[in-house]
Image (tube, grey):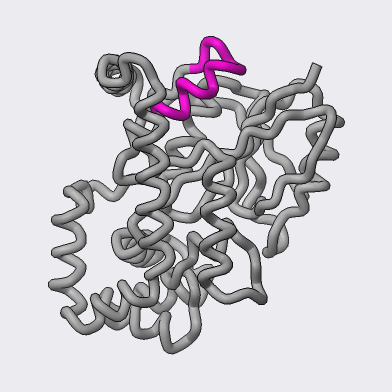
Amino acid sequence: MVRPIILHFHIFKNAGQTLDWTLEKNFRESFVLHSYQDPPGPLSLEKVLEYFKNNENLVAFSSHRIRFPIPESNLVNIIPIFFVRNPIDRAGSIYHFVKNKNSNDSLETIAAKKLDLKEFILWSFKNSKKQIENQQVRFISQNHFRPMFSKFSTACKYSKKSLCGIVERFDDSMVVIEENLKKKFKNIDLSYKAQNVNIKRKKSLAEKLEEIEGEIGKNLFHELQKKNEFDQKLCSFVNEQLEQKIKLIKDFDSKLENYKQRCKDLEKGNSKNEFEKTIFHS
């Protein structure tokens, strides 16, 4: 029997820690969070497949470093999951995250601690730091030597093959993902406690975008939009795909309300459940 494996392609600052928390909640020691302290660069999926084969109890795996395409296997059925996010809001989130880090472990962190948001964006553009320039399309496509429209096409192709959500519609996305995973994992419950959230930025998307435009000015805001044209298009594409998947779910609205209630009930419990993490070192 082919074994189903959930594979979370964790894109930086795309609600990945919250998704990982839910996977830990469900699968405990059968969930692997890949160590981020390994040498940089993409993680070979052939190596991950080998790890799956040698660890029969493994059910879910998450890493910042895994990339498409997924190698075919007769032993495991890979279920890819990832989230995309409005790239302008994501740029603001990245800035606030690295600025508030306790350590100076990167040039971005050092720069963010010294600069305001406008200066940080200009510094990123000047120093070719691609984290806020169509980074989501780049991450998913991994077509280094092709033009961006080709990378975008590839990212859309992989989005169709994945359980892909959008951060701005996190609960809607999680219900769709949960309903699809129930086909393989009958009792899965993706209710969550939000992780790694900046309380000061808990506003609507429109409010956050207006705030960012106010901080950096209209000209730089438009330049940031232009440099993220394909990430914007990818978010629109994923949103359309999400709408189609919602239409396929019977009684979606009632399931969404039930899901939100489960999340509220979870928040009323202990401040945080502790899970033993299984760390895979490449």
Q: Nearer the viewer, residue 153 or 203?
A: 153
Answer whether residue 100 is visible to the viewer in this image.
Answer: no
Residue 213 lies in the magenta stretch:
no
Q: Determine which quarter of the picture holds residue 48.
A: top right
Residue depicted at x 35% and y 65%: 91
What percent of the width, then of the height, locates residue 209?
20, 62
What percent of the width, then of the height, locates residue 139?
56, 60
Q: Measured along the vertical axis of the image, is residue 136 above or below residue 52?
A: below
Q: Measured along the vertical axis of the image, is residue 198 above or below residue 72?
A: below
Q: Residue furthest top?
A: 187
Which corner quadrant holds the N terminus? top right
Residue depicted at x 75% and y 46%: 281
Answer whether residue 31 is visible to the viewer in this image.
Answer: yes
Residue depicted at x 49% and y 78%: 129
Q: Residue furthest bottom?
A: 126
Residue depicted at x 67% and y 25%: 59
What percent of the width, then of the height, locates residue 34?
66, 44
Range of magenta residues: 175-188
Q: Measured along the vertical axis of the image, is residue 5 above or below residue 201?
A: above
What percent of the width, then of the height, locates residue 146?
63, 74
Image mark count:
0
Residue 181 lies in the magenta stretch:
yes
**Residue 176 left/right relative to 277:** left
Q: Determine which quarter of the picture holds residue 112.
A: bottom left
**Residue 91 left/right relative to 64:** left
Q: Nearer the viewer, residue 97 or 15?
A: 15
Q: Measured along the vertical axis of the image, is residue 252 above or below residue 146?
A: above
Q: Nearer the viewer, residue 193 or 244?
A: 244
**Residue 252 left/right relative to 210:** right
